[in-house]
Amino acid sequence: MIPLQHFLLIGAVLFSLGLFAVITRKNAIQILMGIELMINASILNMVAFGKYDKIDNTGQIFGLFIIILAAASVAVALVIIMNLYKRTQTIDPNQTKSLRG
Amino acid sequence: MPGMRAGKTVRKRLKFRKEKDVVEQIIFYILTAIAIGSAAYVVLSQQLIRSVFMFFVTLFAVAGLYVFALADFVALTQIVIYVGGVLVLLLFAFLLSSKDALDTISEIPSGLLSANRLPAVLISLAFFGLLTYTFFNIDFQNLNWITSAQASGNVKSVTDDTIRNIGVNLMSRYLLPLEMISILLMMALIGATQIARKEPKAL
């Protein structure tokens, strides 16, 4: 049996790496990838804690819900990024200053 | 004599279980190393397209970690939805949009301690330190809900039928969240197609 703490530590490492990507990257898609990394870390925590909930299975079910919501958010975010590229020819979030395009 | 033989078999079985545990731990830590290493490559690499492809490896390794947390269905869903759907979509948008980023290696100065990256390093290290400090201060074996779950036999074991449990729970206990999420997913996809469609020229 792998102890719970190891799962949590791996989740913490992945979350910090995702945070680093969100702060440093200059490409909207890579920022999105950092967010995905953070989401994966949180699902790992959910699932690891779900080991102690056999009857209700809350951890795994909400892990599934998180995956579905992440898919929806990625679809919307990519559409927004493509629209941004069509208008401004860049997807660097530092260079997109106006909201109305 | 029979008692001795029984003792021997018990010892053998114990040894076998211990070997199985060792193999389990070895595989787990290899997967951990792959996940963290490839995630670090995703985050730190200067070549953008390589980092996108390395994200595949990260997602597969994290799916393997879900299996070790006894969540095989979540691991399969991760592979089907993330690797099959989300990441291909990401790659698609990436190839369509950032042509100049693909041609030239971006001129972010490398090195973790450059002025560009130092604040980010500090923030994420501080966050990681906070999380680990919390983890090592909590005694997980003596938490209330964990001890009560262990006392009432509410802990998953490897042989449990989790998929059936997930199906029954989704249709009974978590029906309202499921419906809300399905409606939200539909709204998000309709909104996405609405945003993506070509604007009429008259405006």
Image (tube, rainbow, N blue to C red):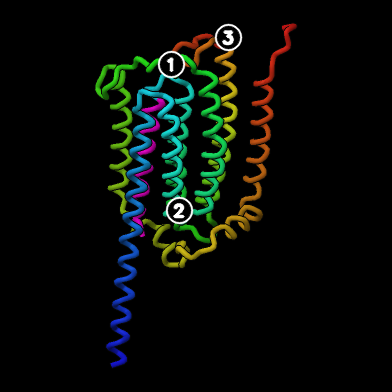
Q: Give the CA distance from mark 2 to mark 3.
A: 45 Å
Where residue B138 appears, x then y in whole percent? 31, 50
Nearest the eye: B87 or B127: B87
Location of mark 2 (residue): B67
Q: Residues within 10 Å of mark 1 (few under 14, many from 20)?
A: few
Label 3: chain? A
Q: Amino acid at mark 2?
A: Val
Left of A66 or right of it: where is B42? Answer: left
Q: Which is closer to the viewer, label 3 or label 1?
A: 1
Residue B148 visible here: yes
**What secondary structure prevails in the magenta region?**
helix
Label 2: chain? B
Q: Which is closer to the viewer, label 2 or label 3?
A: 2
Nearest the eye: B82 or A63: B82
Q: Residue at x 46, y 31 (%)?
A: A35
Location of mark 3 (residue): A101
Tell me where residue B163 sits by quadrant. Answer: bottom right
Considering every residue shown, the one lying at the far front of the view is B103
Q: Which element is circle 3 on? A: loop
Span colored in magenta: A1-22
